[in-house]
Amino acid sequence: MTHEREEDIQALHEELGELRKELAKNSSLVKKIYRHTAIANAMRFIWLAIIVGIPVVAYIFAGSFIETIANYINAQIQEILNAYLQQYLGR
């Protein structure tokens, strides 16, 4: 009876050791999955920032570029009108 009990205890120890190994492996796998998920979420955020950011920056620069061109054209028209006005007034 004592011998059977020792065998049962030994079998339980072996099974416990196997379960600990499996738990360690699963725990490591869970950590890898979590890490991969965190990296994937970060990449999604980065891509979202790029996809949204590029048009916004382009819109801002295009707006300032268009405004600069409009100011230049306005200044040229103003100079031409001033020249015609001076010529008309005889100066």
Image (cartoon, grey):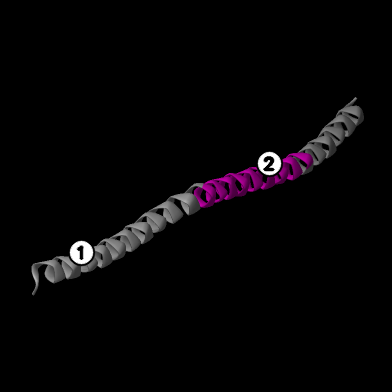
Say what secondary structure mark 2 lies in: helix
Q: Does the magenta stretch mainly form a helix, a strand or a loop?
A: helix
The numbered disc on residue 22 is none
Q: As shown in the figure, which amino acid type bears the numbered disc 1?
A: Leu
- Compared with 26, 8 (above or below) is above
Nearer to us in this view, 11 or 55: 55
Q: Nearer the viewer, residue 23 or 9?
A: 23
- Residue 44 picture location, percent across and down: 58, 46
Given residues 8 and 76, the one toward you in this image is 76
In what element is the residue under mark 1?
Answer: helix
Judging depth in this view, the residue of 32 and 59 nearest the camera is 59
Q: Dot 1: within a 10 Å radius of its alpha carbon, few (fewer than 14), some, or many (20 or more) residues?
A: few
Mark 1, residue position: 81
Mark on residue 30? Answer: 2
Q: Which segment did they paint magenta?
A: 22-51
Q: Residue at x 23, y 67 (%)?
A: 80
Q: Judge depth for marks 1 and 2 and give the one in front.
A: 1
Q: Is residue 25 magenta?
A: yes
Residue 40 lies, in percent from the top left, at: 62, 46
The residue sitting at 68% across, 43% down in the picture is: 33
The vertical placement of 4 against 38, above or below, is above
